[in-house]
Image (cartoon, grey):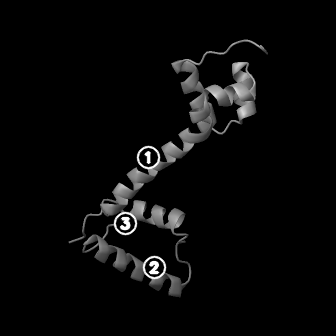
Amino acid sequence: MPGAHHKPTAKTKKLVGDLMLHGLSQEDVAKRLGIAVETLVKHYYYECYELKHDINCEIENLLLEKARKGDWKAIRLWLTCRAKWAPAKTPEELEEADQRKSLIEKILGKDSVNESNGTGEGSN
């Protein structure tokens, strides 16, 4: 409805946020609501531009908490995504990975990080 006045509601804000988080374009979301992209951005700026960043930060903080507690899976994911680290493939890389794991264990003050259950519990 071009020219019609749009009033955002809690329901439409949630809908726009969900659609944007699922990767729909602003054009597609605006079409779904029957409004222009300019109207979408005017009334749903947060959902269009900031929500994804806020959600990513929230998840990143949860991951960091788990990594700091010694969860080896969280540590591996953090290093892979944030430090451009990749799992070892050659014998030399495996040895280097073992050295990294030992360093991480020293930093965390752990005797051993249990990779199989990801709890960070020592194997003693």
Q: Residue 99: where, in percent of width, then height? A: 40, 83
- The x and y percentages for residue 8 are 59, 19
* Type of amino acid at the residue the image marks with label 3: Glu
From the image, tell me which residue sits under label 2. Answer: 97
- Mark 1 = which residue? 58
Neighbor class of circle 3 (other Cα within 10 Å; few <14, some 14-19, many 20+) is some
- Left or right of residue 41: residue 70: left
Q: Nearer the viewer, residue 36 or 98?
A: 36
- Picture quarter containing residue 9? top right
Dot placed on the residue nearer the N-terminal end, 3 or 1: 1
Height in image: 49 above or below 124?
Answer: above
- Label 2 vs 1, first from the N-terminus: 1
Q: Is residue 19 left or right of residue 67?
A: right
Q: Which residue is drawn at 65% across and 28% down?
A: 42
Say what secondary structure mark 3 lies in.
loop
Image marks 3 and 2: residues in contact by CB distance under 8 Å: no
Asked whether the beta carbons under mark 2 and mark 1 sit within 8 Å of each other, the answer is: no
Q: Tell me residue 76's x, y (percent).
A: 45, 65
Q: Mark 3, mark 1: which one is toward the viewer?
A: 1
Residue where numbered disc 3 is placed = 115
Residue at (62, 32) in percent of width and height:
19
Q: Name the secondary structure under disc 2.
A: helix
Residue 40: image tag: none
Spot occupied by residue 14 in the image (x, y as percentages of width and height): 54, 26
Question: Looking at the image, is mark 3 or mark 2 earlier in the sequence?
Answer: 2
Residue at point 41% right, 64% down? Answer: 75
Which corner quadrant of the image does residue 43 belong to?
A: top right
Amino acid carrying label 2: it is Ala
Q: How crowded is mark 1: few (under 14 residues within 10 Å), some or many (20 or more)?
A: few
Q: Count all numbered tags in the image, as a single digit.
A: 3
Residues under numbered marks 3 and 1 in contact, where contact means CB atoms less than 8 Å apart: no
